[in-house]
Amino acid sequence: MSDEKFKKIVSHAKEYGFIFQSSEIYDGLSAVYDYGQNGVLLKNNIKEYWWKSMVQLNDNIVGIDSAIFSHPTTWKASGHVDAFNDPLIDNKDSKKRYRADNLIEDYLQKLELKILKEQKNQEKRFGESFDKKTFLETNPRVINYKSKIDVIHNRFSKALNNDDLSELKKIIDDCEIVCPISGTRNWTDVKQFNLMFRTQLGATKTSSIDLFLRPETAQGIFLNYLNVQKTGRMKIPFGIAQIGKAFRNEIVARQFIFRMREFEQMEMQFFIKPGSQKQWYEYWKKERLNWHLSLGIDKSLFRFHNHEKLAHYADAACDIEFNFPFGFKELEGIHSRTDFDLSNHEKYSSKQIKYFDSVDNSKYTPYVLETSIGLDRMFLAIFTSSLTYDKLEDSSKRVVLKIPSILAPYKCAFLPLLKKDGLPEITKKIQKKLKLNFSTAYDEKDAIGRRYRRQDAIGTPYCITVDHQTVTDNTVTIRERDSMNQERIHIDKLEEFLRSSLNINNWLLNSA
Ligand code: GAP
């Protein structure tokens, strides 16, 4: 997708009240965003869909809501104080700061694009008779690009795994990577940069203590593992789920709500018996992909990507990547976290965090399988894959947000055909009966066609129009967003109609 299309997505999100730049009247705050009147509804619906699938449908998963602040030792024990770093590099001419790993990844992606371009040119030239496999295996330029990619890729993953910052710098120099702003190769050395935000608790300098804003919600779950296990009488395997804010001082914050400094995570830590982690890793990979697919989003937009460099806590990890307008990028992480977190909290707190397994009378520190998805990234994935420009028969364009109907901000809009003859009053009366159970909108301004367009643009699946016939036979028209088909239905049947097509549990259970 082009930059142009991405710009359209960003401006649509603003124009229709989904997402605003934070503090816009003060020229904004970089990588911080606010959700508007329609955005908050979509966001809440995504949360509800996740929560129901995790907590309500799984008897062995419970939810919590832990505080954003926690004791500062939490972050020493979790490894974030020492290891939650990104490698940064500055360009001395533009004074711009970059993530060294991103510069190298972008370079590798450009080489991949060059191969694709060569392939496309030949495809165009030879048409049907083009033999892709032979071409990719024999073309000298392609072979050259491929071997370059292999060499750099190997050096890169080794450097990341060894935290070898000078090798990262050397790769940038060897690949002659330039700053996109200044166009020069005048780089500083690569340095580590800790991503946690600091703040202070307490009123005076001497009595206050340094705190961190949590960079992940997971630690709040580990700190409460014992509380929940004991008070909930939970038996392994069991999970604890949580939705909440996380904060990271990202070095490069671009791509709209993809990389923010304040964002929301939906995380679930699944506590298991040591040795069973491989089985549960595969289980949760499948479960989570199915959850995404249950929303009806095109399967080809998702793929798994195994981590090159494992985080300090993991023995296996992969991402579910989504094809965002700027390419395939991480949407959700699935991590086998071993007993790293619970063991370290045990060590730093000197409190026993063990599980007694009555099945075989063993005592152990549970292993953990984590699923972690960024709520804002999920929002972006849904938004970008839903925004469509339909060409109509009269060759005019229709902007439609074809979001899964159960996530739509409004499930239906009530529209009196005319603003007279008592039609608004009848419409409001019908709406009143339904508004407690469904999120509804009401609109009486402008011609009916324009009102349909406005609802299409915010993704409302059904428009219910009240006209003069309603007065005589109590029927209304229901217009469906994507097909634009209209049918007449008795008002007594409306609730049942909406219930059957919009029931969140139906969606989740059908996918199971
Ligand atoms: N507890 C594990 C953890 O935090 P992560 O891969 O660093 O793992 C999990 O983050 C998810 O949180 C990511 O897959 C992504 O969707 C989201 N996320 C991470 N950093 C983000 C940021 N700066 N802005 C928006 N979402 C972010």
Image (spheres, rainbow, N blue to C red):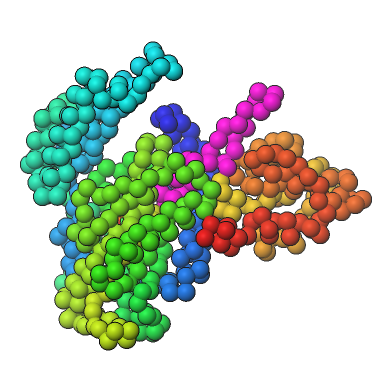
- The answer, for residue 117, to whether it is visible in the render is no
Q: Position of residue 232 (x, y in %)?
A: 41, 82
Q: Residue at x 79, y 58 (%)?
A: 493
Nearest to the observer: residue 195 or residue 120: 120
In percent of the image, x 30 and y 23: which residue is there?
134
Question: In percent of the image, x 41 and y 29: which residue is there?
Answer: 2
Q: Is residue 95 above or below residue 512?
A: above
Residue 406 x, y percent position in the rendering? 59, 54
Tell whether 148 sits left or right of 245: left
Q: Nearer the viewer, residue 13 or 387?
A: 387
Front-most of residues 5 and 392: 392
Read off the magenta span. Answer: 375-402
Quadrant (top left, top right, bottom left, bottom right) of the N terminus: top left
Q: Is residue 263 magenta?
A: no
Q: Is residue 383 magenta?
A: yes
Q: Position of residue 460 (x, y in %)?
A: 63, 47
**Image quadrant of residue 63?**
bottom left
Q: Quadrant of residue 225?
A: bottom left
- The foreground one among 62 and 117 is 117
Q: Is residue 409 left or right of residue 309?
A: right
